[in-house]
Image (cartoon, grey):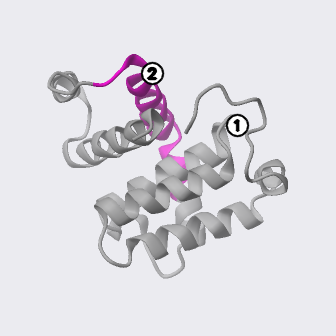
Amino acid sequence: MGSRHQARERALQILFQYDVHGKTGFWLEEYWKPLQVDEDTKSFAERLVAGVLDKKKDLDQLIGKYATNWKVSRMPIVDRNILRAGLYELLWMDDVPAKVTLDEAIELAKDFGDDEASKFVNAILDKVLATEPKLEQKRANPDRGIWRRTQVD
């Protein structure tokens, strides 16, 4: 398993806990203790979590815009956090190719969501990628990040 894939799994688990418990506090320190992850994995996971938490309001508005007939607050916790993380990567992590973001989000939905989660996540992320003006560069080149990648996803 690639370190970024593992980082995305860890980020999803942290975001899930954040939704359940609220502020990170003591449980975040405890979360990392039993895990054997390298510093790059931990750093990418923490970068993703921090970004999602910082942009959560914007991300939820965007999800609500594209998830017709769904309220973000009524979505399964796993699904909404996969969407938040995926959208954060698409919109604010220019070094991650769009194709990688979508593939990883779909895999997370298959691994952690119900039978329909991967289709739901794919549909929302695909709509956002296809229509959001800020993503024009990623649409034009979905297999590459805007800057040279330094780590395998």
Residue at 47% across / 74% down in the picture?
120
Taking the image as shown, residue 97 lies to the left or right of residue 4, namely right
Query: Pointers 2 and 1 in contact (CB under 8 A)?
Result: no
Q: Which span is picked out in magenta? A: 37-60
Residue at 77% across / 50% down in the picture?
138
Residue 27 on the magenta segment? no
x, y percent for residue 149: 69, 30
**Residue type, label 1:** Asp
Is residue 117 shown above or below 36?
A: below
**Number of residues whose C-alpha sits closer than 10 Å to that of mark 2, classed few (under 14), some (14–19) or many (20 or more):** few
**Camera-side residue of 78 and 10:** 10
Taking the image as shown, residue 39 lies to the left or right of residue 90, namely left
Tell me which corner region of the image, top left, top right, bottom left or bottom right, holds residue 74.
bottom left
Find disc 1 in the rendering and name its residue: 94
Q: Which mark is residue 40?
A: 2
Is residue 51 shown above or below 100?
A: above
**Residue type, label 2:** Asp
Q: Main secondary structure of the magenta part?
A: helix
Residue 49 on the magenta segment? yes
Residue at 28% across / 48% down in the picture?
16
**Number of residues whose C-alpha sits closer than 10 Å to that of mark 1, classed few (under 14), some (14–19) or many (20 or more):** some
Is residue 117 shown above or below 79?
A: below
Tell me which corner region of the image, top left, top right, bottom left or bottom right, holds residue 114.
bottom left
Instruction: Provide the secondary structure element on which disc 2 rests.
Output: helix
